[in-house]
Image (cartoon, rainbow, N blue to C red):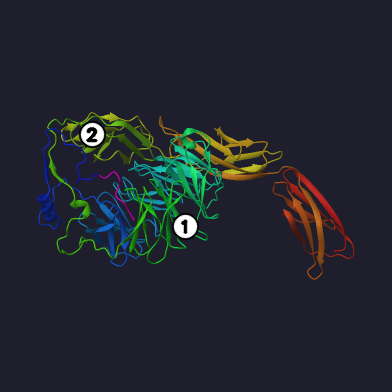
Amino acid sequence: MTSEPSGAKRRFRLSAPARRRTVVFVLVGACVAVLGAAMTGNAPLPSALDFLQVGHWVYNDASSSAVHVDGSTGQVDARANVPAAAGSQVTQGDHSGYVVERSRITEFDKSTLSVGSSTAPPSTEEPFVVESVGGPYLVYRTAGQIVRLGDPAATIPAGGPLSAPVVTSDGTLWLHRIDNGAVCELPRGATLLACPGRLPQGHGGSVAMVDDRPVVVDTTADTMSLVGKDGLGDGAGLGTDLPDTAQVANDAVDGRLAVADPERGKLELIDTGSLVTNTQPAAPVSVDLPANGRFSGPVAAAHTIVLVDQVHNELLSYHSDGSLNDRKPVSGPGGTVQPVVGQDGRIYVDNADGSHVLVVDGQGGAATDVDVDQQPPGDQSGGAPQTPPSAPPSLQAGPIVVAQQPPPDATPPGAPRNVKATAGDGSATVSWSAATSNGAKISAYAVSWPGGSTTVSGSRGSVTISGLENGRSYTFTVVAQNSAGQSAGASSKAVVPGHAADAPKVTATAGSSGAVSVSWSAPDLHGATLDHYEVTATGQGTRQVSATSTSFTGLSGTISFTVRAITHYGSGAMLTGASGSAKATVASGPPTVSILSVRGSQSNQTIYVTVDANGNGAPATCQTTFLNTTQSPVACSGTTEIPIPNAYWLGQVTISVTIKTSLGTASDSWTGTP
């Protein structure tokens, strides 16, 4: 399920007036003939031409092939024969397509439609597919694994389960760790996650985009916050009470972020303007969804929001003001259907067997049903040679630029701008802004550092360098290259790679009068220097501690304590280690106990004493005394039955019970015949 990257350059359309002294050969009828000959293999294609198809790929079970749908025309214009399991997904990068099964990923060439190699995925679950510059990405949410099929290809561990990811226009992937609340980014080309923000422990949430900026929606606190390099911004109220099961759209449209509330059967359109203007947000727009529905989505593009009702097998298209744009049945067999956003500004919905694709215009919201089975693609499938095909519709119209010689006044490029380096564990990610081309296309960027160098494509804006030594300072220099020469070098500030500390083992012990002692073992620092420990307690903020213990007073109830080691290598930045945690329950007062009933069983010589035990927030134990014999203490809370074994009695007896917590003891007694 794919769409061509929006940044892809169309080579078959004149986008601007030609420069003076530029030689351009424009052929109309003759070039169409040459192009047809080249497509049949009878004439070579010019090396400067790239076939970059626009639209969406879907796997068609009936023909065992990946089929390309042109979203602008609603026509099938290519088919690659790739045998795969029914219901497979298809995604695409700049030059290759990928058929994604649970057991393998098969690459095919989008120009020749020939099948390439297959690789094994890191998990057998069905991944969440994200297409972007530098991608595509397969996000295995349960396994916590990210596969980048773009350049450079990589498998990146996230460390835990993930909610649905989103991506910015520069190719940065944003994710939310469900288990620990971390909000993380994976910049284009990077192989390590950076996690600048974190939701409070136990809070549910999702990431989304607002004006191409990442935000996190806290469905427990019902707030929305921008994510920056320094963490989460101030939370803006959503204006509605969302359950943790709320489904958040990928992007805001026209200042509204769509959230589906399946428990109440509502689509809430949340005002996002207050995130940047610090004004009071407008009330959400609430839309009733079809009764008894089960929905996938919402997915948003341009001015349109799309959901798919899985129960009624129906697509619902809404305008950003909540009005219904269109309503279309999803043709073919039922099944789980997920709407996806194409980089051409359209939303695509494939049915379960890939025989139909619904194409939704992001501007107006109208949906068009494309019958894949009934639209042969003009014999453009891979495999044995067939009848020479006609050119796809997107290649038939308009003048064709066949060749263009470089301007004679081209000079070496300007230096790259904004060169930055971010240290990782044995690595660093170097990023830069494009250099001025000065009349000739940037062909490559050369990145060098003490002990090494690498060269990347001129379309790149970042690279991740691995194999660096932790604790050593590195400065990275970037040089741009074009046909006329090299630029001057531009360097980053020095960074020091390092490994963050492991999690310490934390112990929290409640004392008297609301006091708790917290201690921890020194974790493995991996050769770094300890700066301090960060200790956080529920409702108490964060304190810096140099020792391996600290104490808190004035506490009550159950308190969570978290400890992290803050370390550094040489002059490098501070590294925040993994967190260790513990809980302690602090009593609000002395305990109380009362005997509710006493019963005896002569058959097994046991007396059963039922008590109401109240530790006032602290763990408590209870002991019974019968005929001057005190039994071993047992844990007690609320209504608790305590047995007294091997008991012999005749007539009335006296039984007493004593409760004990960290704040004291209390007793009750009973006299009677069990």
Disc 2 target residue: 480
Type of amino acid at the residue the image marks with label 1? Phe
**Percent of width and height locating residue 639:** 74, 56
Quote the CA–CA distance across marks 1 and 2.
49 Å
Q: What span is in magenta?
A: 1-8
> Which of the two labelled residues, at mark 1 and mark 2, occupies the earlier sequence position?
1
Q: Is 548 covered by the magenta stretch?
A: no
Q: Is residue 653 left or right of residue 525?
A: right
Residue at the limit of the structure toward the right, as seen here: 651
Horizontal side of residue 407 vs 653, given as left or right? left
Instruction: Residue under label 1, please give it.
Output: 295
User: Disc 2 residue type?
Assistant: Ala
Label 2: which secondary element: strand
The quadrant of the image that shows the C terminus is bottom right
In the depicted structure, whether residue 485 falls above or below residue 166:
above
Classify 10 Å Cα crowding around label 2: few (below 14), some (14-19), many (20 and above). many
Nearest the viewer among 357 and 248 is 357
Judge whether 64 appears above or below 419 on screen.
Answer: below
